[in-house]
Amino acid sequence: MENESKGSSAEVRILQNGPIMIKGTFSFKDSSGKITTGEQELYLCRCGGSASKPWCDGTHNKIGVPD
């Protein structure tokens, strides 16, 4: 994440047996260089099984999440 604008704030939570949640007003730059800015709620894969990495697609419900 890049915090380019003043007043940006985000909550980052590791959800039990689930993904990483990032919620708030911030800028996010993905691996292709695309930047999204503003109020967002993102869920990042933590189990390693998502078909749409880095985004969570719910696969953790089938395979679990390693501690």
Image (cartoon, rainbow, N blue to C red):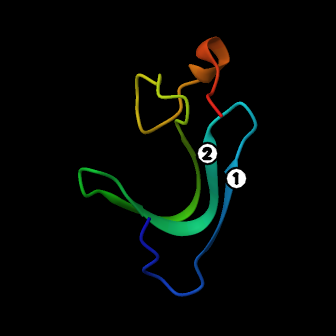
State left or right for residue 61 relative to residue 52.
Answer: right
Depth order, front residue of 54/34: 54
Residue 54, percent from left and from top: 42, 39
Query: Is residue 23 shown left or right of residue 56?
Result: right
* Label 2: few (<14), some (14–19) or many (≥20) C-alpha neighbours in 10 Å: some
Camera-nearest residue between 1 and 26: 1
Question: Quarter of the image holding residue 8?
Answer: bottom right
Q: Quadrant of the N terminus?
A: bottom left
Q: Where 35 sits versus 65, above or below?
A: below
Relative placement, left or right, of 49 versus 22 is left
Q: Residue furthest right?
A: 16
Instruction: Specify the quadrant of the image occupied by residue 53.
Output: top left
Label 2 secondary element: strand
Marks 1 and 2 sit apart, C-alpha to C-alpha, by 6 Å
Residue 31 in the image: above or below residue 16: below
Point 52% across, 36% down: residue: 45
Dot 1 or dot 2, earlier in sequence: 1
Q: Are marks 1 and 2 in contact (CB under 8 Å)?
A: yes
Q: Which residue is mark 2?
A: 20
What is the secondary structure assignment of the residue under circle 1? strand
Which amino acid type corresponds to the residue marked 1 in the rendered image? Arg
Figure quadrant of the C terminus: top right
Residue with the mark numbered 1: 13
Identify the amino acid type marked 2. Ile
Residue furthest to the top in view is 62
Residue 66's x, y, as percent? Answer: 61, 29
Residue 33 placement (x, y as % from top left): 25, 58
